[in-house]
Image (cartoon, rainbow, N blue to C red):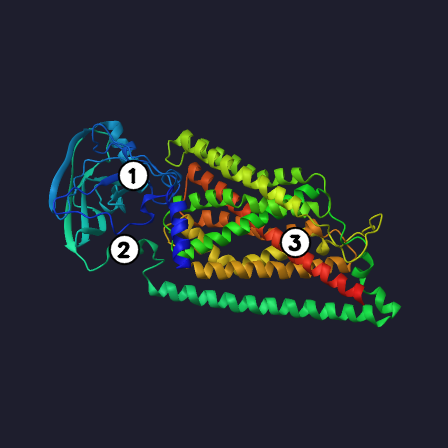
Amino acid sequence: MTQKSFKILFTILILAVSSRSATSSPHDHRYNAGDLVPLLVNKVGPLNNPSETYQYYDLPFCRPEPIKWKKETLGEVLNGDRLASALYELKFLEAKTGVTLCSKKLKVDEVAKFRKAVADDFYFQMYYDDLPIWGYIGKIEDGSLVLSEKGNKYYLFTNVQFDALYNGDQVVEIRAFSDPTSAVDITDDIEINVKFTYSIVWSETSAQFETRMDKYSRASSLPTLHKIHWFSFINSIVFILLLMGLLILLILRRLKNDLRKCSSGDEEEDKEVGWKYIHGDVFRYPQNISLFSAVMGVGNQLLTIVCILFVLAFLGILYPYNRGLLSTSFLLLYSLTSVVAGYITSSFHNQFSDAGWERSVFLAGILYLGPLTVTVLILNTVAVSYGATAALPFGTIMVIVFIYMLFAVPLLALGGRIGYWFRSEFQAPSALNRYPREILPLPWYQKSPCQMFIVGLLSFSIIALELHHLYASLWGYKIFTLPGILFVMFIILLVLTAILSIGLTYIQLSVEDHEWWWRSVFRGGSTAIFMFAYSIYFYFRSNMSGFLQLSFFLGYNVAMCYAFFLILGSVSFRASMIFVRRIYRVVKSE
């Protein structure tokens, strides 16, 4: 009952402002024979550019007069949906063959529009009884195969065949096929007469209405791919466990020897333990403590959001094919978890200073949201210039601003105030020196860039496979529906980042370098740099093209990788802090 109540609560909160196709109610969508089932046209776009979509009627299809636009939810707008009425009349259980949608004479510029759409491999999307439908607009034939022809031939499909499945009085499934035998040649810039038609066939099925969305959440219909995926996942797990075991063994062995030397009383052996001599500086808080506190707060906030998103995926609330629902969930969760950022930022800052915590909380409010807002505004400007549906209307922008001002800002301030009320002083295991100890010049392999490279490369190597599947889901048409595997890999990434950070922090302290606070953050966050570099590689290996798609790809990947930088950086520091306090507490007790 608890799980059911939790699922209902989040469904009401998130799906109320999200996409219409995320779920279906068994109490609705019931029809009698001959009833008109609603069909809405949505958008068109090139198959290889998932972010580049346009309104359906941007192409000169048959259109009703006047066009009735559906009022979209927030999730639909974020998903780039622009739903409108159509001339199709698909009545329940009523089969039709070759029904004329409209006859029209395409002008030269309209022929050119269709030809460019066919050349760019455009698809169309519709919704029939809230079920998504996809189909191709046309086809290209290679003219070089015919001796008398030169160049490619472009054909526009004029007939759409719908195959609908029903169970009782409900629509369970529908597919759309563009009939290749009904096509007109649009290669030349001439006016042509076109008759658009459609057909529909009804078939009964035993599938239940409640499971009609399941096919959209299947990762793959090929068992071989599943076997390869699981085999690669198991190999990765074995490699990760061996690597972490080796690192833990080496760190513990070296640390045990150091503690033995400290407790032996031998001055010669005691001098070999370099980290013991910086006990008066190792807990000196770093420069820019306000910014450092904000990094801790936002990193923990984003980590909380990721964990909640995993919970929603496990409960079946998040659907992989619905990017709008994911965007809406992130927007609401970011607003509601602002209290986490405010509390952790304030409480961390107040451990070292009672003054200036308000500035830290303010930085926490803009540390991630500021760059994200700039990125979204730039992408929105690009989308508007292209006339793409990814462009957010002014009203939607105002709704987002309203949600942030109504929830995020007050909760951020509340969290900061709670952190101030329940503040506690930082208890260092050893007293601080009045003046910081001088740090000797370090060789290149002990400096930050080399250590960042080591942590980033090792951590990235364990998630490379799952990251590829994730990118294929976000920027392609491979649906990723194994949240369990993704969650396990995420946990292992956090654990490995913590272990590597502890090991390199120990090495840093051993050479009497006490400025480890910021370095531990950059070491942990360096994995995000490799993630972004891989995204560039993924783009060039894909079939995506065009400035619009490139802009959205880079913009959203920068935002995602920056979020991982903050998450992993905060985890890395927390792990190093626990380790450092532990070893100096042991030395003090001895």
Mark sitting earlier along the chain (2/3): 2
Q: Secondary structure at mark 3?
A: helix
- The answer to whether the residues at label 2 and label 3 have Cβ atoms under 8 Å apart is no
Q: Is residue 560 above or below residue 217?
A: above
Q: What's under tag 3, amino acid-wise? A: Phe
Q: Where is residue 508? Give x, y as percent.
A: 73, 57
Residue 207 appears left or right of 304: left
Q: Residues within 10 Å of mark 2 (few under 14, many from 20)?
A: few
User: Residue 256 occupies which quadrant of the picture?
Assistant: bottom right
Q: Nearer the viewer, residue 585 or 381?
A: 585
What is the distance, in whole Å, between disc 2 and disc 1 at their CAs?
24 Å
Q: Which marked residue is nearer to the observer: mark 2 or mark 1? A: 2
What is the distance, in whole Å, between disc 1 and disc 3 at their CAs?
47 Å
Q: Secondary structure at mark 1?
A: strand
- Can residue 142 be seen here? no
Taking the spot 27% from the left edge, 31% from the top edge, the residue there is 112
User: How many numbered circles does the render carry?
Assistant: 3
Quadrant of the image containing the C terminus: bottom right
Quadrant of the image containing the N terminus: bottom left
Q: Where is residue 429? Give x, y as percent.
A: 77, 58
Q: Where is residue 280? Give x, y as percent.
A: 81, 54
What is the distance, in whole Å, between disc 2 and disc 3 at their CAs?
46 Å
Residue at numbered disc 1: 42
Q: Nearer the viewer, residue 204 or 27?
A: 27
Q: Which label was assigned to residue 210?
A: 2
Q: Which label was assigned to residue 406?
A: none
Q: Which label was assigned to residue 573?
A: 3
